[in-house]
Image (cartoon, rainbow, N blue to C red):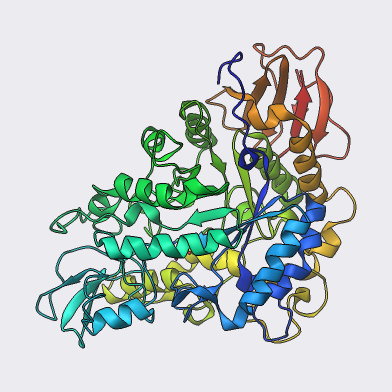
Amino acid sequence: MSIDQPIDRQWWKEVTAYQIYPRSFNDSNGDGVGDIPGITEKVGYLDSLGIDLLWLCPVYDSPNADNGYDIRDYQSIMDEFGTIDDWEALLAELHDHDIRLIMDLVVNHTSDEHEWFEQSRRRNSKYEDYYYWRDGPPDEPPNNWGSFMGGSAWTYDERREQWYLHLFDERQPDLNWRNPAVRDDIASMVTWWLEKGIDGFRIDAINYISKPDGLPDGDTELSPTGIDVFGHGPRIHEYLRELYDRTFANYDVVTIAEMAGTTVDMAGDYLGEDGDGLDMIFHFEHMDLDVGPGGRWDTEGWGEWSLAEFKEIMSRWQTELGEDDWNAIYLGNHDQPRIVSRFGDDEAYREESAKLLATFLLTTRGTPFLYQGDEIGMTNTEFTSLDGLDDPMTIGFIEDLIAEGTIDSFEDVRDLVNYMSRDHSRTPMQWFAETNAGFTEGDPWFPIAENYQEINVEAARTGESIWNHYQSLIALRDELEVLVYGEYELYLPDDEQLYTYTRTLGEETVLVVLNWSDEPVTFDVGAIETDDAEPILGNYEESPDNPQGREFRPYETGIYRL
Ligand code: NOJ
C-alpha cells in the first residue's frame, strides 16, 4: 500500500481473533468434555480480553476419529457438545458482545459414517461417485499416495470391493469434487450456515480438493507421498471461485483458508475479488522452519530454527502480497505445539517470551489469531507413552515407524513427540488452581497439564501478567490504525537476536523492537531516527525508554511511536 492510496478498510482486517478447541475449552455439564454451553459461559471472558472474532473448531456431529474433523452430519451438533439450540444461544451471546463467529468448514472429506459415504458404499446411484473409488486387487493400492495420518492414503472396502481415497485418516474419505452434485450439496450446506447469521468460515485443508486426472504416483521423497500431485490440483481455482460465487459472495463474511504448501507468489490467485474470493490464508512456511527435511515427522534434523530465516519468511508475506490482499498472523493452533514452548522459552523466560510472542502477533500486518491458552502462556506437556497420546496423526506416525522397523518403540521418538505432537495444544484450558484446573467437575477427557496450579487464567489476570499484556496489545491495536493498516518495514534482517520493524501509515510511524533471544543485546540502528521516540508498551516492569544504544534484556520488547 503506498502512502497516498486510500485504505481498503474491512472489519475482518481490524479484528483480533481467538480460536477455540471446544473439547478442551470449558465443560459445563461435568462429563469431562468441553461443550458449547461452556463456551457461552466464557463469552464475557473473551470480551474482557478484547476479542472480536471467534473461530470455533468443528462442533458438528462426528464419531471423533479425528476430534470432529470427521463429520457425520454437517447440519447437526455433536451430542457431547450440546444441541443446535445451545449453538444458537452461543451465537446470540457472542453477537450481543460484538464478537463475530466463524465456523470450521471441513469439505475435503467427511466421516466414513456420513450418510453420503454409507450410500456410496452401497452404490446408491446418486452417491456412487461422491468419493474416490478405484478398482484393484485388495493388496495393491491404486497409487503410492500416503496419508497425513500415516500409512497408505487408500483403504480397501470389502463391501464395495473397491479402494477409497483418504488423504487423512481411513475414517475420513475424500469427497470427489469433480462430481457437480457434491459441489451442489456443499454449497447448500454452506448457505444453510450462512443463513443462520454466522460471520464466515475457516476452511480446512482446502488446497487438496482437486486431484489430477489419472491420480498419478507422487514423489516418494516427499511426505506424505503424493503431496506434489494432490496439493493445489488442476481445478482448485475453479472449485473455490464457484463456491465463493454461490455462497460467500452473497454475505458480509470472512474466509480464511488453511493451505499448506502455499507460497506468497501463489497467494494472489486465491485471495480477493481478483482471485478466488478468499480473504486470508493460513500458510505453513513458518511452521515448516523447525522440522527435518522429510517433513514434520522426520526423526532427524528437527527442533532448530534461525531468527533470520523466520524474519525472511514473515517479511516476505508482509511485503509481497498483492496490494489488497491480507495476511492471517498465527504462531500456533490445535495442530501445533504451544507457542511459548516452540518459539519462546517456556522455562526461564516464560512470561517474557510469551509477551514477546504476543507483541509480534499483534503488531505485524494482518489479522492476528490467538489460540486458547496463549493468553496465559500455556506450555507443552510431557508424554511418556504411546497410550498417553490421543492425536491420530502422532500415533499414526509412530506406528508407521515401528512397522517399517525404523524404531522399536515410543521411547525412540519420545523427544520428537514431546516437541511436535498436536496433543500439546489439546490439553484442557487452565482456568483456576483448583481440581482439574476448573475445566470440568468430572474426569477430563485428556489430562490437564501438570503446571495448572501456577499457570491458569485466575492467576494470570493479576499484575503485569501475560494476560494483561495481551489485553493491552489488543486495545492498542484497536486504538492505533497504523498497527492494522500501516506498511511494514524490516530492519537488521540477518540479526539472530533482534527482530525490528516499523509500521507506517501517513505521517505516523511505530517502531517495534523484539529481542527474540535469551541473551541481552544492544539496539543500534542508525537508519531509524529515535530521538523523539515515545515508548508505548514494553514487557518488563519499567517502561522502555529511547531504544537507541539501549540494552534489551532477554526477550525484552518495546513499542515506540516515532
Ligand atoms: C486440518 C485440521 O486443522 C486438522 O486438525 C485435521 O486433522 C485435518 N485438517 C483434517 O481435517
Q: Count of labels shown?
A: 0
**445 over 508 or under it: above or below:** below
As drawn, is 136 to the left or to the right of 157? left
Q: Quadrant of residue 114?
A: bottom left
Residue at 49% across, 51% down: 303
| Residue 543: x %, y % from top left | 87, 32
Q: Report the quarter where the N terminus lies.
A: top right
The answer to whether residue 35 of the structure is visible from this angle is no
| Residue 20: x %, y % from top left | 63, 62
| Residue 235: x %, y % from top left | 26, 48
Quarter of image, ligand 1 = bottom left
| Residue 411: x %, y % from top left | 45, 73
As drawn, is 181 to the left or to the right of 347? left
As drawn, is 210 to the left or to the right of 458? left
Residue at 73% across, 57% down: 95
As drawn, is 40 to the left or to the right of 149? right
The answer to whether residue 285 of the structure is visible from this angle is yes
Residue at 36% across, 58% down: 298
